[in-house]
Amino acid sequence: MNREGDTIQISGNYQHRAVTEGFVVQRFWHREKERIIGAFSKPQPGERALDVGCGSGVVSDYLASLGARVTGVDVNAEAIDFAECTFRRPNLDFRRALVEDLPYEEGSIDRIYCLEVVEHLYEPQVQNLLGKFRKLMRPGGILTLTTPNYRGFWPALELAMDRLGLAPPMADHQHVTKFHRAKLRELLSPGWNIQRLSTFCTVAPFLSALNWRLAERCAALEDKMDFPFGNLLLVVATKNGADSSARN
């Protein structure tokens, strides 16, 4: 069974509103994606990059601002329409498509970003998606992936947000596969060399309600500490030239 969308309708401008208009904790949470990219997976100018599951295009625009040639991809037509109207750069475009429908030659992509997407898919779909990523990417190409950590604080946070209606319903409606470090290692082996597997968004987003700069300092400390109970997992992995086992 394949899953091509959530059981609830997500507004096409959701991520943009979260970053620009949301409660301070939500804004900090979504801005962390850009900080994490800048710290651990920054594209080089001219590199060809895909933002898979781009939503309203916030991360795609950030990647393009760094000089990468970026295509944002999503199956949500409303999100793609919003992104095309909101973000305009000569090195940025958006497509409503599945990854397998993209007209790129094998080995032509330098970087793929897939942020908080895989939890919306069934596990066999994720395995297939990673296989498609490998075909598109050049040897040594870099995959950046984030997803909730279901062996951390995330399950309690997800339950609280669902019960209080603080975000569109997630459990079962959006999130159907629960990831943790061991599952990600297994999915990425063979075929990928994991360069970083860590957590972020542990305490820092909640400190932003008190002081944004304090939250930023805490986020940098969390990068060094790599708490096992962090809310989000970050994977940065390179494509192997051959299908040999990856190790962290």
Image (tube, rainbow, N blue to C red):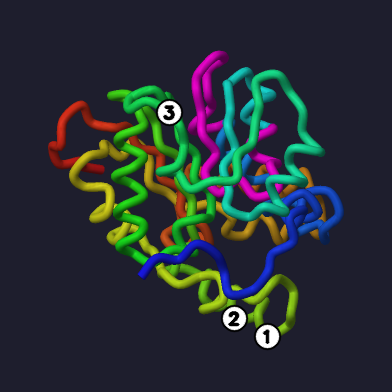
Check disc 2: other Cα within 10 Å, few if <14, some if 14-19, many if 20+: some
Question: Quick check: marks 1 and 3 in contact, CB under 8 Å?
Answer: no
Q: Nearer the viewer, mark 1 or mark 3?
A: 3
Relative placement, left or right, of 195 versus 6 is left
Real-space Cα separation, disc 1 to disc 3, in angstroms: 42 Å
Q: Quadrant of residue 76?
A: bottom right
As rendered, which of 217 and 154 lies closer to the eye? 154
Q: Nearer the viewer, mark 2 or mark 3?
A: 3
208 up-or-down from 101: above or below: below
Real-space Cα separation, disc 2 to disc 1, in angstroms: 6 Å
**Residue at screen point 33% across, 27% down:** 106
Where does the C terminus fall, quadrant-wise?
A: top left
Q: Dot 3 corresponds to which residue?
A: 104
Q: Position of residue 102 (x, y in %)?
A: 47, 37
Q: Earlier in the sequence, mark 2 or mark 3?
A: 3
Q: Residue furthest top?
A: 46
Q: Dot 1 corresponds to which residue?
A: 163
**Residue at screen point 57% across, 59% down:** 202
Identity of the amino acid at label 1? Arg
Residue 48 lies within the magenta run = yes
